[in-house]
Image (cartoon, grey):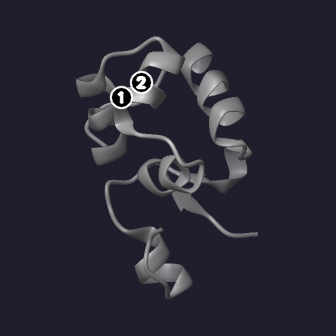
Amino acid sequence: MEKYTLRTARDRAGLSLQTAATSMGVSVDTLANYEKGETYPTVPVLRKMLDLYKVTFDQLIFLGIDYDLIVNGKESS
């Protein structure tokens, strides 16, 4: 099973930062902070994120690194 950072999961879902943030009911700055690993989503926001990005909790990595490049050996989409 591949793992994705929040940014990579959003990119794979084809969503802009603005669109994803609006769909989750958070600000763009808040979502950007989640993606950088500076803050973490609440459970209700996380549930929306999983549905929106079409991933499971087990697939997400809550780090502000390019996990795909480091671990999966490929560039983010």
Q: Which residue is mark 2?
A: 21
Above or below: residue 10 compared with residue 77: above
Q: Quadrant of the N terminus?
A: bottom right
Query: Residue 18 falls in which quadrant of the image?
Result: top left
How many marks do you count on the picture?
2
Q: Which residue is mark 1?
A: 18
- The residue closer to the viewer here, 36 or 23, is 23
Percent from the top left, x then y, of residue 6? 47, 47
Percent from the top left, x then y, of residue 40? 40, 30
Q: Give left or right: position of 8 versus 51.
A: left
- Residues at marks 1 and 2, CA–CA distance in whole angstroms: 5 Å
Above or below: residue 11 compared with residue 20: below
Residue that lies at the very extreme toward the bottom in this rendered image:
73
Q: Residue at x 49, y 84 (%)?
A: 74
Labels 1 and 2 touching (C-beta < 8 A)? yes
Within 10 Å of disc 2 (Cα), the crowding (few <14, some 14-19, many 20+) is some
Percent from the top left, x then y, of residue 43? 59, 19
Q: Which mark is residue 6?
A: none
Percent from the top left, x then y, of residue 11? 48, 53
Secondary structure under badge 2?
A: helix
Query: Residue 46 falls in which quadrant of the image?
Result: top right
Q: Give the residue type that dot 1 points to.
A: Gln
Q: Give left or right: position of 2 versus 38.
A: right
Q: Residue at x 47, y 68 (%)?
A: 77
Secondary structure under badge 1?
A: helix
Above or below: residue 44 compared with residue 74: above
Q: Residue at x 57, y 56 (%)?
A: 12
Q: Give the residue type that dot 2 points to.
A: Ala
Within 10 Å of disc 1 (Cα), the crowding (few <14, some 14-19, many 20+) is some
